């Protein structure tokens, strides 16, 4: 019987070998062969099982391959090597390392074939510590001198940013080939060591190794990645001059640098080269061309390149959307995106992130949030780039709950520690009035870059927390982080919000004297605002005239706004004249000048300015406010009567107006800068968008819950006083963010809350609206009203706190300290 069975086994053996050797063997054939092996008991044949392992791995069926490996009674290093090599080849790096560890646990020592695959997996995962352990194994086993192992080690250390370790391994190589030379040169270029990269490139030639296109491409891509874009372009030119023909990789690597440099002439030359040498069919080249033209502002050429594509590529589609967005064509970008979507194109996370970013950066915040919801419905998972693109949209319209949802998502995905995600979260919470939450996000970050520091300092500045902003500035320096021009913008803005003239001058002068940073126009704008708010308009005007560079609209706009506050007609006309030349189509400048004339009762001049606007086809930007109710953001426009609940809103505001008059407050119609009857002025005040938003919030939220409102213009003094009353009468906390800062209304006062290091609450009266004199622009009653809710029946005072009131009056800063019990 045994003799009869032998021919059958031999026949099965050769049948299986023929099937497994077939290059065209399908997955089903492999599975049939696998079943035949199990039936005939040929699992002990190492050659057959290794062949089957290779076939499964190359078909990406790693689960079946591991079953085969498990069925081998005594697998050898070659069995493991086959599967580990395939996993590394197809970027299944985690599986490769898992198999490598399993091999070691079985006492099988790696050879010079499996070690490079394991090192490649470590490089792919940036697993430096594991790679160092594999390096140790290679040294112990004597394979550390193997050329393939050494090349893999160089690649590992370069990928992990350890260029020094990579160079040490490279120096031990007896005869490094062109691959190793190219890797080490590209590594130095990628990390920004230009001179070292160039020197090594010359040494490569001196050693007799001639660079190939991969060597040149590594240099070009490395210089572009490290921000040395001019060097990347120069390297392409040198490559061409020395007789090396740039390929698609060369072109697609250098075009991003050309776009960032906005070198249109170079871009046109490269485009001509692409056409001449037949590279127009390369999808990466075309995507890079679309991106370059978009960065150069050539939307027509960008669209033409895209339209000439024979086969639409997803990368080109993403580049087109990004290019339209970059040039402010947000409607076109949305249209193109919807067109791609309707064509059943498999849009990826880059596609969705690009269009979300487009909307968030161009004022379409609600659309950005809707797109994010659609993205999730489509099954596309956001990443660490998507969240920072989405959060500014949440911040712009104070969509706090949606911002919190994005925060929770980042926590679940483990990307909340990313510095860009963290910075966006800090900014979002600060702009939504939750400066305490912003601080917690900052405090919990394991690593912080300059963007994080600037975000938290900007948040404190927005909330009028100059002391905290300045303390953070000094803490940042102690941590070894150097400030940049944005840092000083945040600090100067904080000083400006609080009228800290001396401190402002100190930081302004220290920029160049201590930090070597030349003041930019935004810094001058902060100083102009600071001086003007202190009533030093002439000093501010003198500073503008002494600026080393020509003042822009930001600087003149700061002066004009302050002239409106202080009713300074002469300087206001000077600033307006400059602005009309710099920004002839900005209606806000005309409105500010018109308001100055209206305050003076110069109605003919008001009509003249308004006629100028009509001739230019300009209209005043309507007041607009946003409020989030039940996870949805609602928009209310000043004077808008189309809202379905407008009748109930007006009724609620009318009742509140009567209650205010009973308590002795009457609307301040001085803030209505129109030549109409007194009764009409009261109606106009009632239609301000922030009042409508608060009325809407009172109708649609539970009693006692806080309200958060964002406004696109400055809040007027009458609205400020009215909201103070509403906060007391309704027992609500109300947060209002206007174009300048946050206002936190609570118990009849405008307060800003912070938490100190011990978690204790401190309250500061809003300085901007504590002006009683006619020379100042807001009026507020400093007496703190007692609670009118049922809680007032308890005679125990609530929250005894120390308040610091800063009053800027006639250019002098006074400090008043008072003990107040609520």
Image (cartoon, rainbow, N blue to C red):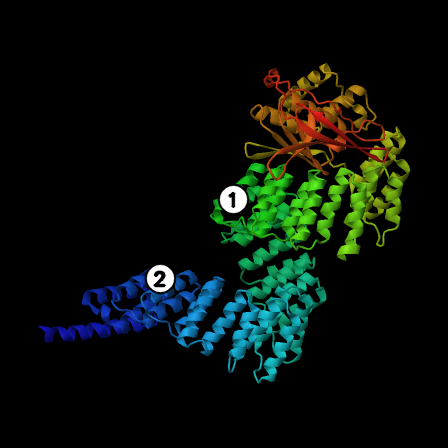
- Crowding around mark 2 (Cα neighbors within 10 Å: few <14, some 14 to 19, many 20+) is many
569 left or right of 754 in image? right
| Residue 268 pos. (x, y %) | 68, 67
Residue at x-position 85% and y-position 41%:
576
Instruction: Tell us which disc is closer to us: 2 or 1.
Output: 2
* Residue 428 versus residue 301 in the image, above or below: above
541 left or right of 15 in image? right
Asked whether the viewer can see residue 139, the reply is yes
Q: Which residue is mark 1?
A: 374
* Residue 174 versus residue 667 in the image, above or below: below
Name which quarter of the figure residue 283 lies in: bottom right
| Residue 211 pos. (x, y %) | 58, 79
Between 201 and 370, the residue placed more toward the observer is 201
Measured in 3D between alpha carbons, the distance from the residue under mark 2 to the one under mark 1, in whole angstroms, is 34 Å
Local secondary structure at mark 2: helix
275 left or right of 121 in image? right
Residue at x-position 62% and y-position 60%:
290
In the rendering, which numbered label is found on residue 701? none
Residue at x-position 56% and y-position 46%:
444
């Amino acid at each position: 019987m045994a003799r009869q069975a032998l021919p059958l086994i031999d026949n099965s053996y050769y049948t299986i070998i023929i099937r497994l050797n077939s290059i065209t063997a399908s997955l089903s054939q492999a599975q049939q062969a696998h079943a035949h092996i199990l039936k005939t008991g040929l699992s002990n044949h190492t050659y057959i099982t290794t062949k089957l392992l290779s076939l499964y791995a190359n078909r990406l069926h790693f689960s079946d391959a591991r079953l085969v490996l498990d069925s081998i009674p005594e697998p050898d290093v070659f069995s493991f090597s086959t599967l580990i090599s395939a996993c590394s080849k197809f970027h299944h790096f985690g599986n490769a390392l898992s198999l490598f560890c399993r091999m070691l646990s079985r006492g099988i020592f790696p050879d010079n074939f499996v070690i490079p695959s394991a090192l490649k997996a470590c490089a792919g995962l940036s697993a430096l510590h594991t790679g160092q352990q594999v390096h140790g194994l290679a040294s112990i086993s004597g394979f550390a001198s193997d050329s393939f192992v050494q090349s893999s080690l160089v690649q590992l250390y370069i990928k992990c940013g350890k260029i020094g370790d990579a160079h040490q391994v490279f120096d031990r190589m007896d005869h490094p080939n062109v691959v190793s030379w190219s890797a080490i040169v590209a590594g130095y270029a990628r990390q920004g060591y230009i001179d070292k990269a160039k020197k090594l490139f010359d040494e490569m030639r001196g050693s007799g190794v001639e660079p190939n296109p991969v060597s040149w491409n590594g240099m070009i891509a490395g210089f572009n990645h490290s921000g040395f874009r001019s060097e990347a372009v120069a390297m392409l030119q040198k490559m061409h001059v020395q007789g090396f023909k740039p390929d698609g990789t060369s072109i697609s690597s250098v075009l991003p640098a050309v776009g960032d440099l906005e070198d249109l002439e170079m871009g046109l030359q490269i485009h001509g080269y692409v056409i001449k040498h037949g590279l127009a069919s390369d999808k990466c080249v075309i995507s890079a061309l679309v991106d370059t033209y978009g960065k150069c502002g050539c939307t027509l050429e960008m669209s033409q390149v895209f339209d000439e594509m024979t086969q639409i590529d997803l990368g080109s589609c993403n580049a087109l959307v990004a290019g339209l967005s970059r040039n402010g064509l947000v409607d076109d970008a949305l249209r193109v995106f919807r067109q791609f979507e309707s064509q059943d194109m498999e849009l990826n996370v880059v596609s969705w992130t690009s269009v979300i970013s487009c909307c968030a950066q161009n004022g379409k915040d609600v659309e950005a949030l809707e797109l994010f919801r659609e993205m999730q419905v489509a099954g596309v998972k956001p990443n660490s780039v998507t969240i920072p693109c989405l959060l500014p949209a949440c911040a712009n319209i104070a969509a706090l709950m949606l911002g919190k949802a994005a925060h929770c998502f980042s926590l679940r995905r483990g990307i909340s520690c990313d510095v860009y995600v963290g910075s966006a979260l800090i900014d979002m919470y600060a702009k939504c009035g939750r400066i305490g939450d912003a601080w917690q996000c900052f405090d919990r970050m394991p690593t912080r870059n300059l963007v994080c520091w600037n975000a938290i300092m900007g948040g404190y500045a927005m909330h009028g927390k100059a002391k905290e902003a300045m303390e953070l500035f000094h803490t940042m320096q102690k941590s070894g982080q150097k400030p940049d021009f944005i840092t000083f913008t945040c600090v100067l803005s904080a000083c400006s919000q609080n009228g800290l003239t001396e401190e402002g001058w100190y930081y302004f002068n220290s920029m160049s004297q201590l930090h070597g940073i030349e003041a930019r126009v935004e810094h001058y704008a902060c100083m102009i605002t600071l001086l003007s708010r202190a009533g030093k308009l002439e000093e501010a005007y003198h500073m503008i005239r002494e600026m080393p560079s020509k003042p822009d609209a930001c600087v003149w706009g700061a002066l004009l706004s302050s002239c409106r506050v202080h009713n300074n007609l002469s300087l206001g006309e000077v600033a307006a004249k400059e602005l009309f030349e710099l920004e002839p189509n900005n209606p806000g400048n005309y409105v500010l000048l018109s308001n100055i004339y209206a305050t003076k009762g110069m109605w003919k001049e008001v009509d003249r300015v308004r006629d100028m606007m009509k001739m230019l086809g300009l209209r005043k930007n309507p007041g607009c406010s946003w409020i989030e109710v039940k996870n949805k953001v609602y928009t209310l426009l000043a004077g808008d009567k189309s809202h379905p609940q407008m009748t109930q809103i007006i009724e609620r505001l009318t009742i509140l107006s009567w209650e205010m008059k009973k308590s002795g407050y009457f609307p301040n119609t001085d803030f209505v800068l129109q030549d109409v009857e007194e009764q009409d002025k009261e109606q106009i005040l009632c239609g301000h968008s922030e009042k409508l938003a608060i009325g809407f919030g009172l109708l649609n939220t539970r009693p006692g819950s806080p309200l958060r409102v964002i406004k696109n213009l400055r809040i007027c003094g009458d609205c400020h006083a009215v909201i103070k009353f509403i906060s007391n009468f309704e027992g609500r906390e109300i947060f209002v963010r206007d174009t300048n800062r946050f206002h936190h209304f609570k118990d009849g006062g405008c307060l800003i809350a912070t938490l100190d290091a011990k978690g204790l609450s401190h309250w500061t009266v809003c300085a901007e609206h504590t002006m009683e004199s006619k020379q100042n622009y807001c009026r507020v009653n400093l007496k703190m009203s007692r609670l009118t809710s049922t809680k007032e029946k308890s005679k125990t005072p609530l929250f005894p706190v120390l308040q610091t009131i800063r009053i800027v009056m006639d250019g002098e800063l006074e400090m008043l300290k008072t003990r107040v019990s609520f």
